Image: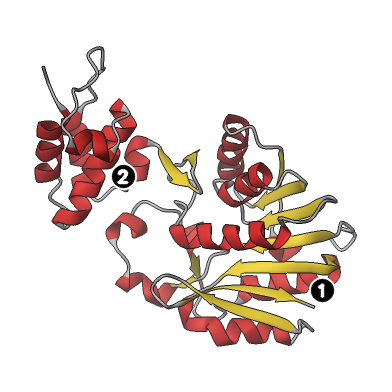
Amino acid sequence: MATAKPLYQRLSKNITAYPPEEAREMAFMLLDHYFGLRKTDVLTDKPLPPNRTEPDWFKILERLNRQEPIQHVIGTTIFCGLEFEVSPDVLIPRPETEDLVRLIMHDFADRTDDVHIVDIGTGSGCIAVTLSRFLPQSVVTGWDVSDEALTLAQRNAHNLNADVTFTIQDILSVPVDFAEKFDCVVSNPPYVTRSEAAEMNRNVLDYEPDLALFVEDSDPLVFYKAVADFCVRHLTKDGACYVEINERFGNATQQVFAERGFTKIQVYKDIHGKDRSIRATF
């Protein structure tokens, strides 16, 4: 009877484009995705499912060794405990963004009335869908400039039973007659400067969309200025704005919000101690 551990060891050994620790984590992810085997199942060498359909391991290893993200290989990723479909049309959700979402859920957990939320640059819909699922009083809208991203986000909302309205809208060109107000404005906009690309890994540069990643070095805070300006007109009196930020521009991003009349601006660090998100209120 075939068991999990020998397959795990074979996969780990043949994922050669990454350090051994990362290769082992990828092997765990593959066995979980294809056979539903958790890490403890693998380590205790449980039998492989008897009626399993074997994937093409050679092709999977080939893709991983080209540094194609494992999330693209298996087609999904876990975000805040929910499984999201991902593709090269959207940014792969990161753990840092989970921290931002948990902050929002904490801040609005005790609200009993409707909480109107807009997620600007929704991508896969991970922020919008998660907030809709875990804040039952929320009324959530997701904006993006990409038709492909919105199609994927709608599919994720459907698969996860989330009630989110997705709309194609560019934060840089919101109609002057737009009148809706929001209690929560959240955005994880493009914030990597073009000059930083040389420091990035191939699995990001070659496989994730430039549109969701990069801003020009000449105006790296362009989207934060637009989000803050939008909040001046469309954030409710007691509302809050939440953004993920580039660690290099923590102080400068704070200043963007301060210049527009925000009085309470908090910078939060990620698990590596780097400036990673901001909450701003009037």
The residue that appears at 32% across and 67% down in the rendered structure is 200
Residue that mark 2 sits on = 70
SS class, disc 2: helix
Q: In the drawing, does residue 49 fall left or right of residue 241?
A: left
Instruction: Give x and y (percent) for residue 24.
Output: 19, 48
Name above or below for residue 3 compared with residue 117.
above
Under mark 2, the amino acid is Ile
| Residue 236 visible in the displayed image | yes
The residue that appears at 57% across and 36% down in the rendered structure is 156
Task: Give the total of numbered labels.
Answer: 2
- Mark 2 or mark 1: name the one nearer the start of the chain: 2
Measure how far apart labels 2 and 1 are at the Cα level: 40 Å
Q: Nearer the viewer, residue 47 or 244?
A: 47
SS class, disc 1: helix
Res. 51 mark: none
Pointers 2 and 1 in contact (C-beta within 8 Å):
no
Name above or below for residue 68 compared with residue 35.
below
| Residue 188 visible in the displayed image | no
Q: Nearer the viewer, residue 139 or 145?
A: 139
Name above or below for residue 202 compared with residue 2.
below
Q: In the drawing, does residue 156 fall left or right of residue 25?
A: right
Res 54 quadrant in image: top left
Res. 232 mark: 1
Residue farthest toward the top in the current orientation of the protein: 51
Under mark 1, the amino acid is Val
Q: In the drawing, does residue 39 fall left or right of residue 230?
A: left
Q: Quadrant of the N terminus?
A: top left
Q: Residues within 10 Å of mark 2 (few under 14, many from 20)?
A: some
